[in-house]
Image: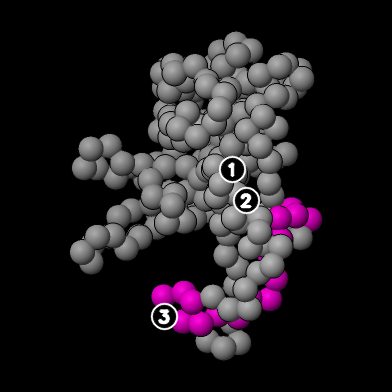
Amino acid sequence: MAAAETGWLRFTGLTAEVSQILQAICAEPPETVELDGYRVRVTGATLDPAGHRWAGQGSYQDLAVPYLLGIEERLPNKISLEFVSPTTFRREELFIPLPQPNFVFGSLLDRWQAFAPIALHPEVRRYAEAMVSLCHFEARSRLVPYKRGGQMIGFTGQATFMAQNRDRYWLSVLHLLTDFAFFSGVGYQTTSGLGQARRLGS
C-alpha cells in the first residue's frame, strides 16, 4: 500500500468474549497496526453505522425477537443480499461460486446454530432447497488465492431469493438469517474476509 493510500478494515465477533475485545479496541484504537509486513496508521474506529455503512453491533436476541415473536407482521417473500467480498461454498473438494439458496441459507444456519443461544429448526436448509428459488442475480466471478499457490473461484454481486411457500415461521427464519449475514458472513473462509454480505433494500 502506498503512503498516500487509505482504506478500511472490518472485524466482527460472533461470541460475547470476542465482541468485548473488539469493543475495547474500538474505544481505544492503536496508533498503528501491522498488515502483511506493512505498518499502517490507524485514523479512527467506529461501531456506529452512521459513521460507516459496514459498522454495527447487536445481540442474537436483538436479531431474533422481531421475527420469532411475530413483531415483524408483514414479511415479504423476496429477500435480496449483496455479496461484497468474494463468496464461495465448498462441498467435499469442489468450490461452488453461485448463490444457491440451500448453500446461502444453509451456511448461515450452520453459523447461527454454532454460536447463537437460540436454536433454529434444523430443517431450514431443506426448506431453502425445496421452497426457495434464486429469482434474480447479478454476479461476477473472482479469483482468490488459495493453498500452496493455488486459486479458488468466488463471486461478488447481488442476489434475490423468493420463498414459494409463505409459511410464517420459515419466512421469519429466512429474514432472521439474512440480517445475521451482516455479522457472520456467508460461505467458505469468512474468517479470512470472504463472504462479506448484507441485506439489500432495507
Residue in view at x 44 percent, y 18 percent: 122
Q: How far separated are the C-alphas under marks 2 and 3? A: 27 Å
Look at the numbered disc 3 and give the secondary structure of its residue: loop
Predominant secondary structure, magenta span:
loop
**What residue range appears in magenta?**
34-50
Query: Along the line of sight, which residue is nearer the eye, 180 or 82?
Result: 180
Query: What residue sits right under mark 2 in the picture?
Result: 20
Look at the image and say whether residue 36 sits in the magenta stretch: yes
Q: Is residue 98 left or right of residue 15?
A: left
Residue in view at x 53 percent, y 86 percent: 2
* Residue 16: assigned label: 1
Q: Is residue 47 left or right of residue 186?
A: right
Look at the numbered disc 1 and give the secondary structure of its residue: helix
* Residue 37: assigned label: 3
Q: State which tag comes first along the sequence, 1 or 3.
A: 1
Total tally of numbered discs in the picture: 3
Contact between marks 1 and 2 (CB within 8 A): the answer is yes
